[in-house]
Amino acid sequence: MDRNEMIKKLKPKLTEKRFVHSIGVEYTAASLAFVHGADVEKARVAGLLHDCAKCLTSEEKYRKAKKHGLPINRSEKNSPDLLHGKLGAYYAKRKYDIRDEEILSAITWHTTGHPAMSLLDKIIFVADYIEPNRRMVKDLPEIRKEAFEDLDKCVIHILKNTLDYLKSKNAIIDETTEQTYFYYVDNKEIEEIRSLRR
Ligand code: DGI
Ligand code: FE
Ligand code: FE
């Protein structure tokens, strides 16, 4: 399926705002792929489709995820919007004919992140947060700079701010979001210790 065909299918599934965001993530992911040496085409496709299941209602997300046999954890049961990554990957495969596991993984994990993400996973996770149409959030200019200079530092910064935000709202925190944060904080520390020894 070429890009025009994907867009023709995707546009009616999203609100205008969500569609504009998706194009923003597509191009931001491509730019990050240039800098970090990832596959630009895969970054574009994953960016374009990452929120393809976002504009269903919470009930629909829960119902469709259940119907298609996707695993649903406790926090997803409480906040079914969290399912739009997994459900999005399902639709990317079934409705947009995406067979590439790297693209499907990046879509699956774009909201919570995941410990030991691939380069493409990280690019989509970050592009989603920094794309130009995103409304201003705390530290965004700094986070945008980090995205092109130190991707892991940027991932940590985004997760830290997301966790702080969720805690301030008393929202239920998905264990994957928290595990991802600790994974990258630990990983960075280990890297720093190694570089001191050299
Ligand atoms: O779909 P987008 O809005 O483009 O971005 P996204 O897929 O990153 O979703 C963002 C929302 O997800 C934001 O409101 C915070 C929320 N979120 C991220 N991690 C968690 C979470 N919500 C809950 N309840 N728990 C989490 O661990
Ligand atoms: Fe999303
Ligand atoms: Fe998004």
Image (tube, rainbow, N blue to C red):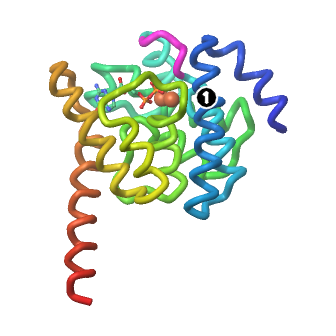
Q: Residue at x 57, y 19 (%)?
A: 18
What segment is highlighted magenta in the picture? 54-58
Q: Position of residue 17 (x, y in %)?
A: 58, 15
Q: Is 169 on the left or on the right of 72, as rendered?
A: left
Q: Looking at the rendering, which quadrant does residue 59 occupy?
A: top left
Residue located 65% across and 34% down the image: 48
Quadrant placement of the N terminus: top right
Q: Is residue 190 left or right of residue 114?
A: left
Picture mark count: 1
Judge: label 1 CB < 8 Å from ligand 3. Answer: yes
The amino acid on which the numbered mark 1 sits, given as a three-letter code, is Ser
Q: Nearer the viewer, residue 130 or 184?
A: 130
Q: Residues within 10 Å of mark 1 (few under 14, many from 20)?
A: many
Q: Position of residue 143 (x, y in %)?
A: 38, 43
At x 22%, y 31%, the residue is 173
Q: Main secondary structure of the magenta part?
A: loop
Q: Quadrant of residue 39?
A: bottom right
Which residue in the structure is indicated by mark 1? 22
